[in-house]
Amino acid sequence: MRHLLFWLSPLLVLAADNRKKYTVDDLEWGKILYGAPLTELALKDKGLVVFLFVFNEEVRPEATLNKFQADLHATKGNIVAIAVESVMGAPGREAITSKKVTELTKFLKKFDYEFSACVGLKKRPPGFESTLPYCYVMNHKKVIIYSGPPRGDEYKQALDKAATPAGKSVDK
């Protein structure tokens, strides 16, 4: 049995490295409402977090976005982030109106966040649950290393791993 594992281990390593890499075009987010447009150059050698949240009159996402801002600040600029007002996937959610877009833009500018924000994500990576907020954390190679709610040890570890610059090891 040990010999079988020995011979299969290179195949397992190849399979692990063959995960889908994502580009800006793969994610197809909607119109950027706030912050810098995200380009492949801006993302070069940095981690990426795509953060899905809900914005409406009853449930302002101030606390959630402020926590997200604090999480990003702890990465010392090694992660680029985009917050996406999620109009897809939630049952009973109507498309966001131009009035709501204006309200959201004013809201984002009021808090001067360090991340970009947009409306809608036309194509999502696999793993999305209907629970919001939700996020995808990608390493500097743009491979998803975490998909889930933005909380807990696994999320924090993924942020640490994504914030590790290209060419440096996270193992101690």
Image: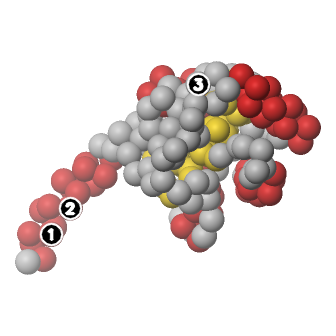
What residue would you read off at disc 1?
A: 5
Figure check: 145 above or below 172 = above
Tell me which label, 2 or 3, sits earlier in the chain: 2
Q: Farthest residue in the right direction?
A: 110
- Residue 104: image quadrant is top right
* Residue 9: image tag: 2
> In x, y percent, where is residue 128?
44, 50
Q: Is residue 51 left or right of residue 71?
A: left
> In x, y percent, where is residue 40?
57, 23
Can residue 86 be seen by looking at this rendering? yes
Q: Residue at x 53, y 57 (%)?
A: 131
Nearer to the camera, 102 or 110:
102
> In x, y percent, where is residue 110?
91, 37
What residue would you read off at disc 3?
A: 30
Q: Are marks 1 and 3 in contact (CB under 8 Å)?
A: no
Q: Are marks 1 and 2 in contact (CB under 8 Å)?
A: yes
